[in-house]
Image (cartoon, coloured by chain):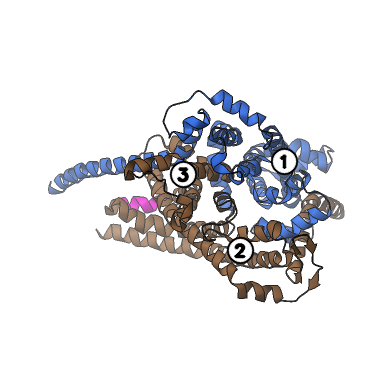
Chain colours: A blue, B brown
């Protein structure tokens, strides 16, 4: 009997403790939510306000200058934003297609076929996965300089064919979801190897390619280090270089409405994609983490 | 029959090479060759001062001795490490807390999907844009200075980017905001992978939430915690975008926010001192390689940790029976 009383009392105190813990948890989560969203809130509000308005101080009210800021940003000849959007879209789009296709192709080559260098090739890719891109930046820069490919989008696109971490993700996905019997069957039907890959394997790989495609697109959209080394002509700049340029310009004299508007335009495509596919993306992070 | 099978497999083998060739050709041309030419450059002196281009000359290890004698590299590694650690400590702490809360069955937090989407959001946004936003927010005419002025009553704005501590702190805060969501999700996946029987045993034992956390969750996810630590450290060594934009490439005040990669970038594009840049690259490569080897060594110890977790589980079970 006594035990049941203790249990009852214990349960009661447990409930209070649980309530307290819930309150603490929600409070911390709300603070973190505020911290994460505050910069973007400031950005959105200030993108709608004019420069003199912003200088008077921050207010949590939407201003009426969204249209004029938007127009001014696109009319700014020092920072041709239309070119930036175009260049970023070309680079990110091409990288996404090349990187996912060739990573799947490489993973397929190593997954399905038996050949002498197979083990070496796999180990090699695992090792290079850890090499930071900055280590070869000097050589890459000088090589592109010699080839006269600076101020060109090609050196930002072609290297994405060799993407070790995308390859690794594809390889893992194939191990779990690509039965070799399907390949056998298509061989018996007289399909050649390359066509088998394109028509039979690619559709199976769609989910993995979608997840990696999103990550590749975002990574290239945001990439700053290598593009900033190679590009200094304003028509060829990508968005991150243009955003960084706002800092180079004499900041205090700059039209702040335009600054916020430009940042807004640079990040809004990624935010829209993210919100639309967030479930997909968050699941993808946890999956990608298995790579170890 | 057997021989025809063998023949088949030989004829397929060439397809393996065809399929992996594009990757390796591109990697060799755009990564491997530049890497070797970078290493080569570290043994040569080549620089452009003003309009005068000095001819290339083999200098052996002179670049290395000069780099270490000059000592800037140590300062910049130090800066990088300080900024990294200020961001990483709250990051791992908050991420662990959130991961534990999100996976707690008794706590049953609502709107988890919403919170996860929000905390991961900063990670996908352009670091250049986030840095620029923070620069604007903390600038003399930004909203934070409005708050500062109204609290302190002073007319003068506080120059956040004129002080060493506040500049480093802001860079670390940006790092924290951009990465804690990512770490939370990794740790959540790790915690969800822990054997539920362990938690059941703890509940039977009447363990408090904090006891469960410290004595079951932490030891069970230890390998992943170390993985997070070391990968974050490798990422930290490469820190570039945020301090570069916040300080406009100067690392100001008095180069206290200059990171190693900013130093490298300065030697390539501003200083045009390719010998020195090559040397910095090699040092950076060695540091990253050592850290990566640490990851590999820890991953191979995963098995040991798993065994330990199993032992712990046995102990817990025994404990449960004893009561």
Please, what secondary structure does the residue beneath circle 2 have?
A: helix
* Place of residue B120 in the rendered image (x, y in percent of width and height, measured from the top left): 50, 42
Q: Provide the chain ID for the residue under circle 2.
A: B
**Image height check: is B241 above or below A262?**
below
**Discs 2, 3: same chain:** yes
Residue labelled with disc 1: A234
Of A14 and B230, nearer the camera is B230
Residue labelled with disc 3: B140
Please, what secondary structure does the residue beneath circle 3 have?
A: loop
Q: Is residue B107 visible?
A: no
Q: Nearer the viewer, mark 3 or mark 1?
A: 3
Mark 2: few, some, or many residues within 10 Å (few <14, many ≥20)?
many
Side of A2 where A260 appears, left or right? right
Q: Quadrant of residue A114?
A: bottom right
Of B284 and A99, nearer the camera is B284
* Place of residue A224 in the rendered image (x, y in percent of width and height, measured from the top left): 64, 47
Magenta span: predominant SS is: helix
């Amino acid at each position: 009997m006594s035990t049941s009383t203790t249990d009852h009392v214990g349960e009661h105190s447990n409930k209070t403790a649980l309530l307290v813990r819930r309150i603490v948890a929600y409070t911390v989560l709300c603070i973190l939510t505020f911290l994460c969203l505050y910069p973007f809130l400031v950005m959105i509000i200030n993108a709608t306000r004019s420069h003199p308005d912003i200088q008077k101080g921050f207010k949590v009210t939407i201003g009426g200058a969204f249209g004029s800021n938007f127009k001014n940003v696109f009319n700014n000849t020092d920072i041709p934003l239309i070119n930036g959007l175009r260049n970023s879209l070309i680079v990110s789009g091409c990288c996404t297609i090349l990187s996912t296709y060739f990573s799947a192709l490489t993973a397929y080559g190593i997954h399905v076929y038996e050949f002498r260098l197979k083990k070496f090739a796999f180990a090699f890719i695992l090792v290079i996965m850890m090499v930071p891109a900055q280590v070869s930046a000097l050589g890459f820069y000088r090589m592109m300089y010699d080839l006269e490919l600076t101020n060109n989008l090609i050196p930002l696109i072609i290297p994405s064919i060799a993407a070790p971490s995308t390859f690794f993700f594809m390889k893992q996905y194939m191990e779990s979801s690509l039965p070799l019997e399907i390949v056998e069957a298509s061989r018996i039907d007289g399909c050649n190897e390359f066509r088998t890959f394109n028509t039979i394997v690619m559709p199976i790989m769609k989910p993995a390619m979608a997840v990696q495609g999103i990550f590749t697109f975002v990574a290239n959209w945001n990439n700053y280090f290598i593009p900033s080394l190679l590009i200094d002509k304003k028509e060829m700049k990508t968005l991150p270089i243009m955003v960084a340029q706002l800092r180079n310009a004499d900041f205090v004299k700059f039209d702040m409405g335009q600054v916020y508007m430009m940042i807004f335009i640079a990040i809004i495509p990624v935010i829209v994609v993210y919100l639309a596919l967030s479930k997909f993306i968050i699941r993808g992070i946890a999956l990608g983490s298995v790579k170890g | 029959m057997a021989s025809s099978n063998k023949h088949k497999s030989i004829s397929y083998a060439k397809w393996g090479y065809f399929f992996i060739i594009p990757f390796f050709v591109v990697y060799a041309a755009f990564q491997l060759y530049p890497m070797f030419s970078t290493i080569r450059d570290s043994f040569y002196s080549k620089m452009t001062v003003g309009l005068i281009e000095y001819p290339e000359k083999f200098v052996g290890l002179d670049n290395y001795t000069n780099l270490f004698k000059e000592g800037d590299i140590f300062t910049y590694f130090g800066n990088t490490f300080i900024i990294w650690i200020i961001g990483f400590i709250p990051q791992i702490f908050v991420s662990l807390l959130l991961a534990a809360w999100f996976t707690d069955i008794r706590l049953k937090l609502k709107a988890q999907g919403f919170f996860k989407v929000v905390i991961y959001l900063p990670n996908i946004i352009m670091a250049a844009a986030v840095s620029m936003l923070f620069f604007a927010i903390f600038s003399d005419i930004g909203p934070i200075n409005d708050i500062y002025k109204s609290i302190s009553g002073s007319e003068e704005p506080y120059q956040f980017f004129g002080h060493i501590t506040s500049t480093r702190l802001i860079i670390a805060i940006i790092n924290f905001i951009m990465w804690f969501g990512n770490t939370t999700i990794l740790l959540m996946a790790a915690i969800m992978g822990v054997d539920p029987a362990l938690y059941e045993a703890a509940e039977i034992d009447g363990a408090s939430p904090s006891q469960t956390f410290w004595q079951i969750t932490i030891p069970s996810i230890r390998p992943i915690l170390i993985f997070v630590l070391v990968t974050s450290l490798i990422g930290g060594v490469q820190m570039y975008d945020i301090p570069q934009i916040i300080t406009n490439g100067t690392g100001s005040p008095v180069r206290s926010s200059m990171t190693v990669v900013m130093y490298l970038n300065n030697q390539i594009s501003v200083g045009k001192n390719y010998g020195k840049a090559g040397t910095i690259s090699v040092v950076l490569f060695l540091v990253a390689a050592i850290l990566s080897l640490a990851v590999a060594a820890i991953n191979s110890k995963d098995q040991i940790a798993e065994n330990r977790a199993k032992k712990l589980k046995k102990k817990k079970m025994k404990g449960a029976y004893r009561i």
